[in-house]
């Protein structure tokens, strides 16, 4: 009889044991924060201004609109020199990378060429502490001795790209 009660107890207890928790749930809330899109605008084009090629050499245009010479090139003192100037806008507190043209490019005047290279930025601070930041970019040109006179220009615009880190 004890066996019978024991077996009956097991059959009656099984449904109680199986009534334990077999699933659980939790809830959550989704959110997103939209940041200000990063953008860059050209405020001024690069202009090495007027030079006299004479014996040739290099002209370095610094981001602060100053020029220096390596070699026998002469600079016109009253020329309107301008580094390229960009305004970068973005989310306050964010950092960004700026990609400048790598390598060498040509500026042309008909079939004559001048090499444009060694781009240099005014600022290594690539973080927004305000809504926008001004960046200036200089470069170097190589001028041949007795370079043909006239205006030299890049055949196509050069690209500067900014992106958030």
Image (tube, helix red, strand yellow):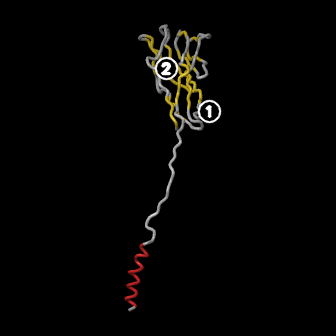
Q: Quadrant of the N terminus?
A: bottom left
- Residue at mark 1 to residue at mark 2: CA–CA distance: 33 Å
Mark 1 lies on residue: 130
In terms of sequence position, does the residue under pointer 1 or pointer 2 come before the other?
2
- Residue 53 picture location, percent across and down: 52, 10
121 or 29, nearer to the observer: 29
Q: Is residue 76 visible?
A: yes
- Residue 69 picture location, percent across and down: 57, 16
From the viewer's perspective, tell me whether residue 113 is left or right of residue 72: left
From the viewer's perspective, tell me whether residue 8 is left or right of residue 87: left
Q: Is residue 72 visible?
A: no
50 or 19, nearer to the observer: 19
Mark 2 lies on residue: 116
Per the image, label 1 sits on a secondary structure element best described as loop
Above or below, 91 relative to 149? below
**Residue located 55% across and 15% down the image:** 48
User: Residue 44 bears which disc, if any?
Assistant: none
86 or 67, nearer to the observer: 86
Residue 43, image quadrant: top right
Residue ranking furthest to the bottom: 1
């Amino acid at each position: 009889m004890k066996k019978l009660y024991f077996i009956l107890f097991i059959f009656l207890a099984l449904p109680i044991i199986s009534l334990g928790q077999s699933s659980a749930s939790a809830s959550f809330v989704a959110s997103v924060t939209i940041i200000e899109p990063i953008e860059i605008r050209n405020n001024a084009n690069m202009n090495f201004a007027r030079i006299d090629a004479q014996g040739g050499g290099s002209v370095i245009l610094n981001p602060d609109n100053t020029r220096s010479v390596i070699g026998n090139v002469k600079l016109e003192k009253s020329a309107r020199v301008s580094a390229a100037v960009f305004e970068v806008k973005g989310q306050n507190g964010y950092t960004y990378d700026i990609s400048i043209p790598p390598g060498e490019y040509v500026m042309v005047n008909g079939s004559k060429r001048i090499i444009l290279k060694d781009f240099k930025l005014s600022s290594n601070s690539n973080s927004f502490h305000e809504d926008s930041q001004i960046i200036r970019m200089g470069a170097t040109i190589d001028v041949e001795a007795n370079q043909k006179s006239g205006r030299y220009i890049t055949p196509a615009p050069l690209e500067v790209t900014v992106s958030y880190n």
